[in-house]
Image (cartoon, coloured by chain):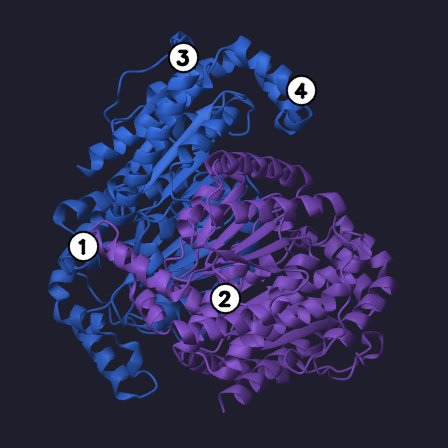
Chain colours: A blue, B purple
Amino acid sequence: MLREYDFQKLDLVEDIEMCLENAKLELSKKQMLLKEKNIPVVVLFEGWGASGIGTSLGKVIQNMDPRFYNVVKMDRISEDDARKPFLYRHFYEIPENGKVTFYDHGWMNEVTSQYLHHDLSAKAYHRRIQSIMNFERTLVDNGYLVIKFFFHISKKEQAKRMKKLQKDDNTAWRVSKEDMWQNKHYDQYIDLYEEYIERTNTSYAPWYIIDATNKKIAQMQVLEILTGYIQHRITYGKSDAPLIENIFELNAPIRVNEVDLSPTISEEKYRKELKKCRKKLSQLHNILYRKKIPVVIAYEGWDAAGKGGNIKRVTSGLDPRGFTVYPIAAPDKGELNRHYLWRFYKRLPKDGHIAIFDRTWYGRVMVERLEGLCSENDWQRAYNEMNEFEKELSDWGAIVIKFWVQIDKDTQLERFTERQNTPEKQWKITDEDWRNREKWDLYETAINEMIAKTNTKFAPWYILESVDKRYARIKAMKILIEEIEKRIK
Amino acid sequence: MLREYDFQKLDLVEDIEMCLENAKLELSKKQMLLKEKNIPVVVLFEGWGASGIGTSLGKVIQNMDPRFYNVVKMDRISEDDARKPFLYRHFYEIPENGKVTFYDHGWMNEVTSQYLHHDLSAKAYHRRIQSIMNFERTLVDNGYLVIKFFFHISKKEQAKRMKKLQKDDNTAWRVSKEDMWQNKHYDQYIDLYEEYIERTNTSYAPWYIIDATNKKIAQMQVLEILTGYIQHRITYGKSDAPLIENIFELNAPIRVNEVDLSPTISEEKYRKELKKCRKKLSQLHNILYRKKIPVVIAYEGWDAAGKGGNIKRVTSGLDPRGFTVYPIAAPDKGELNRHYLWRFYKRLPKDGHIAIFDRTWYGRVMVERLEGLCSENDWQRAYNEMNEFEKELSDWGAIVIKFWVQIDKDTQLERFTERQNTPEKQWKITDEDWRNREKWDLYETAINEMIAKTNTKFAPWYILESVDKRYARIKAMKILIEEIEKRIK
């Protein structure tokens, strides 16, 4: 497909300039429709060095409204991004609804070139491709259009262009060492590119090979494809995404309503254990930092179950420069207008650091499900999407721990009443808490389903029996200690 | 003050452990009051290497609720941050209302150590101190508490501690080269620190020198000061900040209602000029990129004045990988809960890049003033705050250009009516636009005052006469070209 590509000596149609102007206008009209219909679009430009991606991109968007698109150059990974999961920097740049992100090089370039430079093992490379396919699929499933272009030129053409660029002092800097290396190893690259494109050429995120020998014709092709693709979505709308069966190995389901909530701990033992655990965690945190192991801790649980106090005890043993606690409330506008996992992606820790989420992405299958804040297809699909998300974290090397803080309905009532009657605690209780309480049984069903479907080996759920809050705190700290010790052995 | 510091051989009170526990509890209670009253707090920890800041910080906050504070380690500047203005990374980390950011080292450490390592000239160093004082003042004026601690130990004590750390393999890595260098040049440092602290010891953001010879006593001191400082604010509230006279040289004021709006350009000349300007801008953008000169362009103007179309033409000549357009609407929750300039700070470009703001920080003295979204003291103070903000950009090396896009009231009516009657344009017009129009005269007064007070030499306003939109576009492009050419000469 790339190897036997028939580079056509296409003749310029006589009025190519006018055709291009018209096509640009047409695209800008489509952009306004995207804005109107709130459709977000991801456009990926990949291709050979010196294939003219930058120039062509500049021309293609010339008539678009720059308030509603963004172009991101992704060929260099910053120090900070290198300390995040592979998908982080790509996910970070996804557009809001109604806007377009053009990626000038992206995930294909990253993984293929790392693989060819032996910065990725074969196994890691194949895992990356799986991540990429999941990434593209979840974008599309959540309403994004994803369009991928590959700018193709022959080895000879590439060499010719680089020579020309190098001759001129004003353009010589644009030819990188990597470009030179690529031309030298063109045949190796083309094999890999071909295989990559075949594997990732999906019905939801198709590839378009662009003959980039002639820049104007390449631009024309891109414009026509973009315009057509957008129009297709506008005409036919988005259909429900098929559900994907879970392929990850699961631990046994847990029914939270059947958990024995009687365990307690004496005041004296609590003090002793707390001190011991703090000290241990403090030592382990130091090791995590030096080994650059990231940790992601997710807290979910009933209102008034004691999440806040639990988190406080866990963090009291940690170096405060090495962790952040994120209380998750309703998403803000920029978050609501993007893929629902975006706001969690952007809060991921650097390696060696700990992120603690007080409420999490699981809101999708609890409050959003029960309050009708997303469609049924959305929350049903979410189990797998969240497993895939956590798999990314795990593959990156993170320790992922999920706590469900459990109490019974009577205990909740007691605590609500106490909050209501204690002036300093009144801010902690809202009408919403009372409304949620009325839906206790519905939540219970949703929680049991959630745990059953997302209790993976790499990101297991742990129940914290929190009728005795102190018991739950010590348990959380011990689990954390154990999980870290397992990893650093 | 540092040099003759009398390091006291303070005896530990017998029950120091219990005192500390109580003080920590006290601070955690104050934290809940901060949360309740929505007060944001910035706490800066500076001091000698090995003075125990990290450890003490960890202890001090042990009882605080980690959902409402954040600890940031600022001793290393990332590659990306190094390409932003000096204050960027510090401003970026300011807390939301009701939360606390603890800076583990900060702006003092940054500028003093750069100066002593000759990475900053004397002139630049003094300019930085001015930036810092403006930064701290504007935080306080906008409702923040700012508290600064300096952890002080003697040269001998520092040497002793480092030796001890180095002896143990588990802690040896914590002694950096910089620490060693510092101890060797302790006397130089102490002179500079003393001078720095004197200059920046203001009534709104005072310094506290902490005797860090004994860690527990240091923690006790920090806890008591923090608790007292917070209580003081809670008891007395925030008073209106005094207004600061503008000290920047201003260009002549412009009264927008007196601008001659008759200039036009013929269709033919427009086409020709547009093409020429595009080409020129494209070349200049390339040079900006290579010289790493940042550009910040601010667009303000009446509704329907043609800002969007103007921006579109300006950007059509630029490399899309090198600019971003930010449409500024109402702030989201995280933005509303921080200093009003925060959302602009976080959108500043990297050096060599261009940021275009479609509406800007000047909203403070227009819509926020007229709609009562901030207090009178707030918007009156804002003129100087915005001048200082733009001075930061200018000192950083940025080209700062502010466009006011001007039309008359009749032209606006015409365009509103056209938008209303054209289905594809209806999304552009809202009830709010009509409401704003009713306040035309009030806006006019505010705009004239705004331009008069912020038309600085380093960030001047340019009027774009936009009854003929095409005229305004060419004018904007030519101004941009001229400003860039001036700079790159």
Residue B370 in picture, x, y percent from top left: 81, 57
**Residue B272 figure quarter:** bottom right
**Residue A355 figure quarter:** top left
Q: Nearer the viewer, residue B235 or A338?
A: B235
State the residue position of label 2.
B108
Question: Please, what is the three-letter code of the amino acid marked with disc 2?
Answer: Met
Left or right: B305 in relation to B212: right
Q: Is residue B246 visible?
A: yes
State the residue position of label 4.
A420
Question: Please, what is the three-letter code of the amino acid marked with disc 4?
Answer: Gln
Q: Residue at x 24, y 78 (%)?
A: A162
Residue A390 in picture, x, y percent from top left: 32, 35
Which is in the foreground here, disc 1 or disc 4? 4
Question: Please, what is the three-letter code of the amino acid marked with disc 3?
Answer: Thr
Label 3 crowding class (10 Å Cα cut-off): few <14, some 14-19, many 20+?
some
Mark 1 and mark 2 in contact? Answer it, CB < 8 Å.
no
Q: In the rendered structure, find residue A194 and report the number of the disc placed on it.
A: 1
| Disc 3 and disc 2 on one polypeptide chain | no
- In which quadrant of the rendered image does the C terminus of chain A lie? top left
C-alpha separation, residue under disc 1 versus residue under disc 4: 65 Å
Helix, strand or loop at mark 3 = loop
Q: Nearer the viewer, residue A481 or A172?
A: A481
Left or right: A118 in relation to A263: left
> Which badge, 1 or 3, comes first in the chain's sequence?
1
